[in-house]
Image: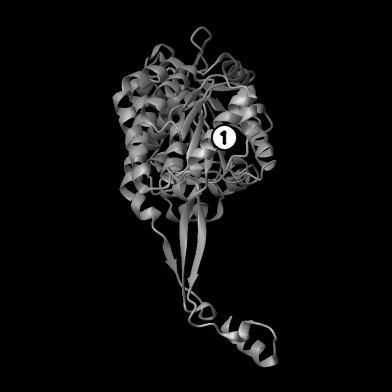
Amino acid sequence: MSIDSPSQDSAQHVFAQLKQSFASDRTRPLQWRQTQLRALQTMLKQHAEELITALNQDLGKPQTEAWTSEIGFLLTDIKHTLRHLKKWMRPQKVSTPIIAQPGKSAIYPDPLGCVLVIGAWNYPLQLTLAPCIAALAAGNCVLLKPSELAPATSGLIKKLIPRYLDNTAIAVIEGEKAQTTELLKQPWDHIFYTGGEAVAKIVMRAASEHLTPVTLELGGKSPCLVERSADIEVTARRIVWGKWMNAGQTCVAPDYIIVEECVKDALLKALKKEIRAQYTRQPLDNADYGKIVNQRHYDRLCGYLEHQNVYFGGETQADTQKIAPTIILDPASDSSIMREEIFGPLLPVLTTTQISESLNFVRQRAKPLALYLFTNDTKLERHVVNTVSAGSICVNDIMMFMTNANLPFGGVGASGMGQYHGKAGFEQLSHQKAVMIRKFWLDVAVRYAPFSSFKLTLLKKLL
């Protein structure tokens, strides 16, 4: 099912079709779920080149980056889900108290119903289809709304999904703000949104009208802490890889570095060396380096550069919407680059005498989606892991937790709510239905009126 620019009536119509399909119970069986996931797997493999081309058109993604961070990521997610889905779907037996005997109790993962997935533009394939994988695995009908800011990828999703998946249970709607607004008026059973805080508030307000639960995968300012015992060369290599992938347009990219003063110069030199090694001395002309998604975001990022102490980079290219990997030294804490999520190729570097003293700086700000710590000090490592609140923490690397389907992914506080990937996504888009089954043959009268002191005494012992 694929709809162009829906009016309110067509938004209502497609929602009604999905509700009807879910009511028929077609999405509940294991076989249906497996069939849809395998079909999605086939689609990604058969059209990999077209998808890579679309991602390049939208964001300038090189082939390797497009494969690993989008197509390959999704194929791994599907493979993991297919391997474990049968087990995830089994009822989980739990104990039954004496007062409810004879009986048995279990938790049944139950599909929620119809799920709206609103994708994001920075990883327009992954962030639209990864929630879809979780929704299908959980036995739901799904409406996909790809981001209009990545039109080539959005158009390809719209074109391909109806060819491979069950058209009665999975639909695609393209459009901009007006279309999204009409979709949000429908009483979905769950809404999955990936994007920024401002739109997340709109999504949550709309969901509240129907008491619809939401998963919000947002972002924020993810700090990167570099302590003196870290291997500086490896640290720089990993930071450069994680920060400037997709030209910095990654929700879990390091937003700023706090480095101990005694290793600051060494880190800066190593970062400069690594940027040149990975992206050459002319990154704006490098096919392995992406572009900013549109003019508005390009102008926003150029604005951040004004009146800053640029240590390295800073070159811009308006006609291609490219900004070179840029390192900025010690920006003011109240400047816009330190107040707002950067979401681009600019990396502020702050200095501290000791990393342990900088933890209050991190804690006083909104809880980040990710926190990175580079250290060989196991005591500091334990302290940070145990005391700092973040969606995810990665020690001595950048973003690698995303490769582990056994780890849930999601934010906390302003960086989001709800989790997915692997089993976490299956559980997020399922209702954990409590079921108790009892027999007729023993019916103790102690719980029924009329009551007495003896019954009360007995109930106190049984409960």
Q: Amino acid at mark 1?
A: Ala
Of residue 6 and residue 58, the one placed in the foreground of this image is: 6
In the rendered image, the vertical position of residue 385 relative to residue 371, given as above or below? below
- Asked whether residue 432 is in view, the answer is yes
User: Which element type, helix, strand or loop, lies under badge 1?
Assistant: helix
The count of marks equals 1
Disc 1 target residue: 16
Quadrant assignment, res 306 = top right
Q: How is the image coloured?
A: one colour
Where residue 355 sits in the image (x, y, percent)? 53, 46
Which quadrant of the view contains residue 189? top right
The image shows residue 306, relative to residue 347, as above or below, that is: above
Name the image quarter holding residue 166.
top left
Residue at image location 52% in from the left, 17% down from the top: 314
Using residue 452 as the reference point, say whether residue 268 is left or right of it.
left
Question: Which residue reaches farthest bottom?
Answer: 454
Q: Nearer the viewer, residue 66 or 46?
A: 46
> Percent position (x, y) of residue 128?
47, 31
Quadrant occupied by the C terminus: bottom right
Q: Nearer the viewer, residue 171 or 406?
A: 171
10 Å neighbourhood of mark 1: few (<14), some, or many (≥20)?
A: some
Answer yes or no: is residue 229 visible.
Answer: no
Image-based side of 231 in relation to 96, left or right: left
Tell me the residue at 38%/43% (across/down): 33
- Return the x and y of residue 70 as percentages of the image width and height: 39, 30
